[in-house]
Amino acid sequence: MKIGVDIDGVLADQVAAVLKEIEKDYGRSYSKSDINRAHWSFEGIEIWTEISRLLSDPDYVIRVPVIEGAREAVRQLSRREHELLVVTARRPHTEEATRRWLREHFPCLTQYHHARTGTKHNIPCDVLIDDLDLNIVEFVKSDPERQGILFLHPWSLNDTDIRDYSDRVFFCPEWRSVVKSIAAISQTS
């Protein structure tokens, strides 16, 4: 089975990294639970604007921590003969540093696909693991055979109709439940 895996919020703990930078640069301290929607902002600055700014720094990209449980889960899934593809909406100018980060933390992930937010349904895979409901909805709507795994964070559920696709979407708060969901999908395929 081909599985598309998003980077930010699924493999990379981008929000934890950016919150440290916000505290350092602006003197404001926030936790991941404060980020309760995709377009969250602080002092009039959207978090995604700050992330884009930081991603232009290759040293920052290399320092982003791995989501807890991701390494072992990716290793398990790749050993089970699943084809794993990295799918990211990161801007192309970050690709070199991103690939370096992937080689360091996930050497088994060699297929890299760039797709803007809302276009991940164009990636050739059967299952998409992403932390943004919009990407999952577009993915499962594009083909009735496809399944999605929403990697849950406080910002993952926005104003989409994702619940209308609950028969093809798994809601997973951590990697152990992702591995179980992939096993369940494999049994029904």
Image (cartoon, rainbow, N blue to C red):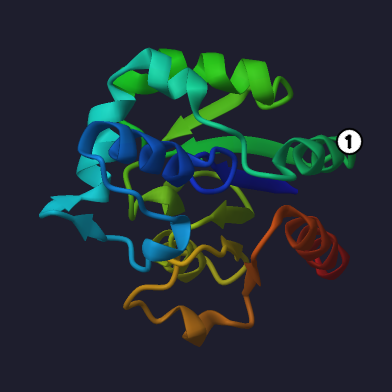
The secondary structure type at the circle numbered 1 is helix
- How far across and down, in percent of the image, does residue 78 sit? 81, 36
Badge 1 local density, few (<14 within 10 Å), some, or many (20+)?
A: few
| Residue shown at 43% from the left, 13% from the top | 96
Which of 23 and 60 lies nearest the eye of the viewer? 23
Q: Quadrant of residue 52?
A: top left
| Residue shown at 58% from the left, 54% from the top | 128
Q: Measured along the vertical axis of the image, is residue 103 above or below residue 31?
A: above
Q: Measured along the vertical axis of the image, is residue 12 above or below residue 130?
A: above
Amino acid, disc 1: Arg
| Residue shown at 60% from the left, 48% from the top | 125
Q: Is residue 138 found left or right of 127 in the rendered image?
A: left
- How far across and down, in percent of the image, does residue 112 sit? 53, 27
Q: Is residue 4 found left or right of 42 in the rendered image?
A: right
Q: Is residue 124 found left or right of 138 in the rendered image?
A: right
Instruction: Give the residue pinned by disc 1.
Output: 79
